[in-house]
Amino acid sequence: EKPYTCGQCGKSFTQSKNLIKHQRTHSGARPHRCGQCGRGFAQSTNLLKHQRVHAPRGQPLPCPDCGLGC
């Protein structure tokens, strides 16, 4: 059962959090910002992938919580 339905396109989801992520595709909202270049992303996972461009090759990314390489 998929009780959460997008009012704009009719796509349905099993979890409300997935509907919220999907709705950003319609609104253009990009609440997750890169601290180094300011680029915005609709989903935090895409921000994490993007942040790799700022890390030296082969080096771990700094943890957003503690600052250590995770």
Image (cartoon, rainbow, N blue to C red):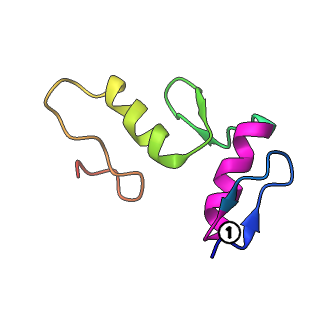
Crowd class of label 1 (few under 14; some 14 to 19; many from 20; radius 10 Å) = some
Q: Residue furthest left?
A: 58
Residue 40 falls within the magenta-colored stretch: no
Q: How many marks?
A: 1
Residues shaded magenta: 13-26
Q: Is residue 24 left or right of residue 49?
A: right
In terms of image quadrants, where is residue 20? bottom right
Along the line of sight, which residue is nearer the eye, 21 or 38?
21
Residue under pointer 1? 16
Residue 43's quadrant in the figure?
Answer: top right
Question: Does the magenta-highlighted stretch encompass residue 18?
Answer: yes
What residue lies at 17% left-to-right and 24% top-to-bottom? 57
Name the residue at the front extreme: 1
| Observer able to see residue 29 | no
Q: Position of residue 2 (x, y in %)?
A: 66, 71
In front of the other: 29 or 19: 19
Q: In the picture provided, is 3 more to the left or to the right than 67? A: right
Q: Which residue is painted at 58% across and 26% down in the image?
A: 39
Label 1 secondary element: helix
Quadrant where the N terminus lies?
Answer: bottom right
Image spot of residue 16 (x, y percent)? 68, 69
Residue under the point 69% across and 60% down = 12
Residue at image location 78% in from the left, 38% down from the top: 26
Three-letter amino acid code at the position of disc 1: Ser
Residue 29 vertical position relative to residue 6 in the rendered view, above or below: above
Is 47 left, or right, of 42 in this rendering? left
